[in-house]
Image (cartoon, helix red, strand yellow):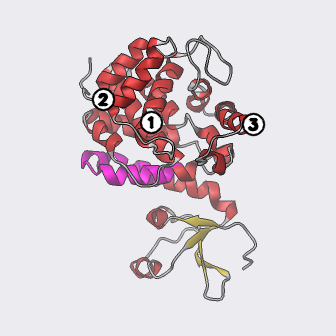
Amino acid sequence: MSTNRKWIPARKTHLHYYDDIPLYYRTPSGNISLYKPAGMSFTHESLERKYAIDEFFIHPENRLESIEAAQKGFNSSLRDQISNAELSDIKNSLTELVEETLSAPRAGGLTRVPMTVNQLVDGFSIKPAVIKNFAKISFNDYTTALHSVNVMALTIGYCYYVSLPEDQTRKLGLAALLHDVGKTEVPPYLLKATRRLSDDEFDQIKAHTTRGYEILKSYKEEEIVEIAGASMEHHEKLDGSGYPHGKTDISYFGRVLSIIDCYEAITNDDRPYRTALSPMNALELIKKDVDAGKLDKKIFRDFAYSLTNFKRK
């Protein structure tokens, strides 16, 4: 089979989700060949064989199907994993899933994400203190996906602390997970740049807010469409100094995400020009913007308390 197509590498940890997805592998001669057709489950023998193959591939035409299959499989086992406190495994799988989902946001890959957030909210509501540890689990490779998962976890913890109604907790958790979806359309080299960006480059970075809004608005699912505004507002400031529009009338979701997004980034993202801050130092830094009238004082206070107290108010 031709190797000119842009074959999509399949994660080995997701292979058991792909019963209905044809999988391919690279032969010793370098050609891509069918490993299993759609509708064929992995047998014991094929499970043993798969570890002898370095890499599996998904046909480009099956990209969206594979994302949906992984989301469906992950969602079905999520509550049991939370009940069993398998937090590191959950976070690793969720981060991988978000990475795959964000690879095709305009192709419909976000459709099942609300269900994932609902499962997390349901699971963590049984053991709300668990979310604290979930947010603290770290990995070596800091990515947009990991940042988004962390922001979601911190946001759900905040929601529990302020006793936000369940439907609002689900919506705000979803907004948190997808707040940076627009970064999928920013050149990766800009997101990883260690040098000072030019004005034009920084404008490209700032455009992720409007791009995210456009992506989310393009969906027919109401729960996705209604969080689009929060995606566009999470870098706005109450004094009008934020972007993309410099607005001062910011929604509740936007005001929450602006604080939690900032906190997560400065406590986890090491850069050559600054190291990640401790939680206390990060809160002190953010408080300067609160005192300057840029961020919501009550939300900041509640968020700070939610980091250590996960009992509902």
Q: Residues within 10 Å of mark 1 (few under 14, many from 20)?
A: many
Q: Position of residue 184 (x, y in %)?
A: 64, 45
Label ID, residue 307:
2
Q: Residue at x 41, y 82 (%)?
A: 45
Front position in the image: 264 or 129: 264
Q: Amino acid at mark 2?
A: Leu
Report the residue marked by disc 1. 266
Q: Amino acid at mark 1?
A: Ile
Q: Based on the displayed image, in which of its 4 quarters is residue 182 positioned?
A: top right
Query: Element type at marker 1?
Result: helix
Q: Reading the chain from its start, which is encountered first: label 2 or label 1?
A: 1
Q: Residues within 10 Å of mark 2 (few under 14, many from 20)?
A: some
Vertical position of residue 131 compared to residue 171: above or below: below
Q: CA distance from mark 3 to mark 1?
A: 24 Å
Q: Amino acid at mark 3?
A: Asp
Q: CA distance from mark 2 to mark 3?
A: 37 Å
Q: Reading the chain from its start, which is encountered first: label 2 or label 3?
A: 3
Front position in the image: 201 or 247: 201
Label ID, residue 200:
3
Q: Based on the displayed image, in which of its 4 quarters is residue 310 positioned?
A: top left
Q: Residue at x 44, y 49 (%)?
A: 94
Q: Residue at x 38, y 49 (%)?
A: 91
Query: Element type at marker 2?
Result: loop
Give the residues drawn in magenta, as a range.
71-98
Q: Based on the displayed image, in which of its 4 quarters is residue 127 positioned?
A: top left
